Image: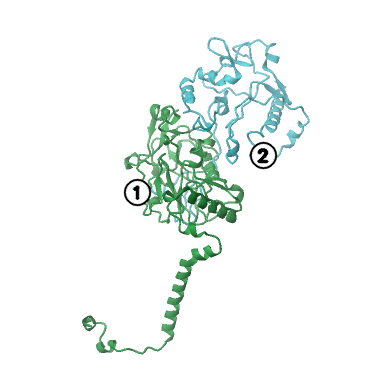
Chain colours: A green, B cyan
């Protein structure tokens, strides 16, 4: 009451206290209609998952799914079955989605020989064939996990690097090439900023994402100093014959719209003992992969005998991805 | 020297024939329609031996990845008009010589650009042309070609043994599966060992709605990583 009296806007004072009859004017009607429509749209949007539920596109259990690390094996299997069915419905191919777990006594490390790499981008193509990113869409941004930087010889200067180089033949005079992908950092900044803990580090060192838990805020992309993460702005567009049916829950299954994905060192391959796809196709053999905890592994040989360089060592991420120079 | 044209054409045709006959097992992706010149040779007998006994690269489950070795190895045999000739069929008649004062009639396709290594008999065995030669004159068989290269390239041979030089395929974990290593000549031409330049695959798409498209694709205009 007193507040009302002090209100300089309200000169009429007592009149405001009386019940006022306001007839429906054109303005108030339109205002009300607009608010009403907006509200209805909001409710519809909020209910959309439920409507999808009714149409059988989403199971109620998926909607109420727990975090990956809280799932029982049975729940996870059921969810993966549902994802397989969804993929078959949407893309016409039924994948086999697995959930390989970290191997005991294994910590993955990757090394890349900068003196050997010629920048042919075969690794990028292999990554695309292996990991089911979005393709064949004119408006799509590049979703492959590997970017090959063309650098000027004489320094490791990212500011003068070029990702979009194209040439008749590589390597070009005065250039060298540095493929960059997820470094699987020991002190991964991306996992620290995630507000919902949808990304974390596994015991074998791989930084993974639960795509069903990710809310798409992209904090992790801002935190990553290596530009290793990609955001699915739209539903991945993949022709059915390009889908790799060997998929896993945490790595290369077809991502939903609005989530972040990243390189996982092909964990569906590497946890089964195989090499990552990018290494398998490298024509120069510049890539070396192995178990950091095995003293006899080739990655340990490289770390112990070669001049190893860590990209952006000063940011303190302690990556498991190393570059080395060796003629 | 008047035979040059025919020799080169014959060798080229033989190589083309060979590639058509044997490309399939490891280069299924490069299915080219046979050129008309090759069709002339399709009625010739098939060469009994593949051009080189090389380990299988690639696992059946990985058909989507192209694991073709960078170089198709051709063994020591001479293949001409679809027939394979054992080296010694000619070389038992022709004595080995260190220096050749006239151009060769055979092996015209060989360009020897191997640095200081300018003599055939540095690597090839003087009396057994189906083998290579070690420092002490003993023969190194064709399948042990890695040992031949290791004669000079010891540090690289050491790295290759350790898995730090050259590509490996298969399983990083020997307990879970087999691993294949590419041998020297599956990437390097022994006569011209420098790794040859390649055509790169197309560059990534520039973000379609970005403000500043790259000024020049040739690297004149600096294009930075988004977070740099």
Q: Position of residue A144 (x, y in %)?
A: 50, 46
Element at label 1: helix
Closer to the camera, A85 or A136? A85
Closer to the camera, A79 or A283? A79
Placement of the N terminus of chain A among the 4 image quadrants: bottom left
Place residue A158 in its image quadrant: top left
Count of labels in the image: 2
Residue at 42%, 76% (x, y): give it.
Answer: A35
Q: Can residue B222 be seen at all in this image of the molecule?
A: no
Q: Are marks 1 and 2 in contact (CB under 8 Å)?
A: no
Q: Position of residue A118 (x, y in %)?
A: 50, 35
Rendered view: A38 above or below A123: below
Q: Position of residue A279 (x, y in %)?
A: 50, 36
Task: Sort mark 1 into few (<14), some (14-19) or many (20+) by Cα contacts within 10 Å.
Answer: some
Whole-number angstrom distance, CA of label 1 to CA of label 2? 49 Å
Which of label 1 and label 2 is nearer to you?
A: 1
Instruction: Pinpoint the chain carrying mark 2.
Output: B
The residue sitting at the right extreme is B43
Instruction: Pinpoint the chain carrying mark 1.
Output: A
Task: Sort mark 2 into few (<14), some (14-19) or many (20+) by Cα contacts within 10 Å.
Answer: few
Element at label 2: loop
Rendered view: A159 above or below A174: below
Placement of the C terminus of chain A among the 4 image quadrants: top left
| Disc assigned to residue A192 | 1
Q: Which residue is mark 2?
A: B31
Q: Position of residue B131 (x, y in %)?
A: 61, 16
């Amino acid at each position: 009451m007193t507040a009302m009296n002090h209100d300089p806007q309200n000169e009429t004072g007592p009149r405001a206290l009386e019940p006022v009859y306001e007839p429906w004017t054109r303005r108030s009607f339109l205002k009300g209609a607009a608010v009403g429509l907006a509200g209805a749209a909001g409710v519809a949007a909020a209910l959309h998952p439920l409507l999808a539920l009714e149409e059988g596109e989403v199971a109620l259990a998926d909607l109420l799914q727990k975090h990956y690390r809280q799932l029982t094996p049975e729940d996870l299997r059921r969810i993966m079955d549902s994802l397989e069915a969804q993929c078959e419905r949407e893309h016409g191919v039924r994948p086999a989605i697995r959930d390989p777990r970290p191997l005991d006594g294994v910590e993955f490390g990757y090394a890349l020989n900068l003196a050997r790499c010629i920048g042919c981008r075969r690794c990028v193509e292999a990554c695309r064939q292996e990991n089911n990113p979005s393709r064949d869409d004119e408006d799509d941004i590049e979703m492959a996990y590997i970017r090959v930087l063309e650098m000027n010889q004489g320094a490791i200067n990212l500011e003068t690097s070029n990702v979009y180089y194209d040439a008749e033949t590589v390597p070009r005079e005065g250039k060298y090439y540095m493929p960059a992908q997820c470094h699987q950092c020991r002190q991964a900044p991306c996992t620290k900023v995630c507000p919902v803990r949808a990304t974390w580090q596994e015991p074998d060192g791989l930084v993974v994402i639960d795509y069903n838990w990710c809310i798409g805020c992209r904090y992790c992309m801002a935190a990553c100093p290596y530009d290793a993460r990609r955001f699915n702005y739209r539903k991945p567009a993949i022709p059915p014959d390009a889908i790799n049916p060997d998929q896993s829950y945490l790595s290369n299954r077809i991502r939903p719209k609005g989530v972040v994905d990243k390189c996982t060192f092909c964990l569906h391959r590497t946890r089964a003992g195989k090499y990552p796809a990018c290494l398998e196709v490298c024509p120069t053999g510049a890539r070396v992969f192995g178990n950091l905890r095995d003293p006899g592994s080739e990655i340990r040989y490289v770390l112990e005998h070669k001049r190893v360089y860590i990209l952006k060592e000063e940011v303190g991420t302690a990556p498991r991805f190393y570059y080395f120079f060796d003629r | 020297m008047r035979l040059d044209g025919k020799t080169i054409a014959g060798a080229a045709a033989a190589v083309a024939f060979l590639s058509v006959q044997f490309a399939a097992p490891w280069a299924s992706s490069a299915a080219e329609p046979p050129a008309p010149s090759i069709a002339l040779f399709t009625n010739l007998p098939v060469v009994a031996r593949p051009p080189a006994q090389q380990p299988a690269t690639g696992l059946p489950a990985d058909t989507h990845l192209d694991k073709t070795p960078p170089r198709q190895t051709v063994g020591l045999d001479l293949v001409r008009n679809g027939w394979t000739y054992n080296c010694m069929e000619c070389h038992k008649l022709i004595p080995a010589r260190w220096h050749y004062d006239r151009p060769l009639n055979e092996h015209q396709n060989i360009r020897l650009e191997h640095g200081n290594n300018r003599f055939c008999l540095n690597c090839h065995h003087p009396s057994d042309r189906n083998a290579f030669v070690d420092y002490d004159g003993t023969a190194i068989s064709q399948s042990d070609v890695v040992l031949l290269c290791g004669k000079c390239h010891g540090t690289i041979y050491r790295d290759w043994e350790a898995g730090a030089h050259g590509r490996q395929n298969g399983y990083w974990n020997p307990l879970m599966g087999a691993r294949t290593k590419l041998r020297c000549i599956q990437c390097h031409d022994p006569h011209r060992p420098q790794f040859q330049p390649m055509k790169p695959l197309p560059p990534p798409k520039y973000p379609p709605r970005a403000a500043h498209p790259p000024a020049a694709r040739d690297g004149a205009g600096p294009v930075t990583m988004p977070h740099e």
